[in-house]
């Protein structure tokens, strides 16, 4: 009896998968990312740059305070006293990654690479939050504990899961990656 129920379930969901096609899961993953994280990361990135031209392209003291807080504090928050390599480079890369990667993911352009980069960004962000911003153990949380509200162990694990789906599946047919690949296939000349 149990085997029949499992077989029925498998047939029903296989039919659903065929009906939806391979593009739905990546599209949903990108929509979840856009809904939950796009504005979070863009707003965070805006706190790191100045306003107006050209300061809107230059990481400000807030970027250094957020990304390398101990180095910024040690320099008295005078960014001219902070060496470009490695700290300034890390701040510039982190600031621009926070602007560019989420937009690429939502558009579905270079989706796999952008998602992989975003996973790296979240890992670094989490390490900085724990080591440099002094989060307590309750805020960090632990995997497999009975509390589902740990900011690092629980919340960011969900973020990374959505991105892993995109790394493995790509942006799908309903993405710029998919549209460009389709265009490339249609314009390819047979030998």
Image (tube, helix red, strand yellow):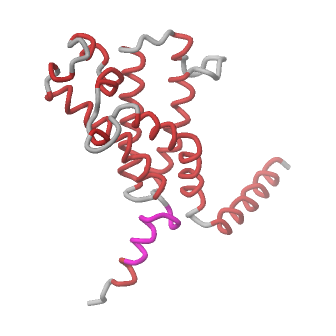
Who's the residue at 66% across and 62% down the image?
Answer: 17
Q: Position of residue 2 (x, y in %)?
A: 82, 47
Whether the magenta-drawn stretch holds residue 180 is answered as: yes
Who's the residue at 72% across and 58% down the image?
Answer: 13
Q: Position of residue 24 (x, y in %)?
A: 60, 60
In the picture as drawn, the residue positioned furthest to the right comes out as: 1
Whether the magenta-drawn stretch holds residue 169 is answered as: no
Query: Closer to the camera, 27 or 146?
Result: 27
Query: Closer to the camera, 68 or 184?
Result: 68
Q: Position of residue 116 (x, y in %)?
A: 38, 44
Q: Position of residue 30 (x, y in %)?
A: 53, 52
| Quadrant that contains the C terminus | bottom left
Who's the residue at 82% across and 52% down the image?
Answer: 5
Left or right for 154, reference 99: right
Q: Which residues are magenta?
A: 172-183
Query: Closer to the camera, 84 or 161?
Result: 84
Who's the residue at 43% across and 46% down the image?
Answer: 102
């Amino acid at each position: 009896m149990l085997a029949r129920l499992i077989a029925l379930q498998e047939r029903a969901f296989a039919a659903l998968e065929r009906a939806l096609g391979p593009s739905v899961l990546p599209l949903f993953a990108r929509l979840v990312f856009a809904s939950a994280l796009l504005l979070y990361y863009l707003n965070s990135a805006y706190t790191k740059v100045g306003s107006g031209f050209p300061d809107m392209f230059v990481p400000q003291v807030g970027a250094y305070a957020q990304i390398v807080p101990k180095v910024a504090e040690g320099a008295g928050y005078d960014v001219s006293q902070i060496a470009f390599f490695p700290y300034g480079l890390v701040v510039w890369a982190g600031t621009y990654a926070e602007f560019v990667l989420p937009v690429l993911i939502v558009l579905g352009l270079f989706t796999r690479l952008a998602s992989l980069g975003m996973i790296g960004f979240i890992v670094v962000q989490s390490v900085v939050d724990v080591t440099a911003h002094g989060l307590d153990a309750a805020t960090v949380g632990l995997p497999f504990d009975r509390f589902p509200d740990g900011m690092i162990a629980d919340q960011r694990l969900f973020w990374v899961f959505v991105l892993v789906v995109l790394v493995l599946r790509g942006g799908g047919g309903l993405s710029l990656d998919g549209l460009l690949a389709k265009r490339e296939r249609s314009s390819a000349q047979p030998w």
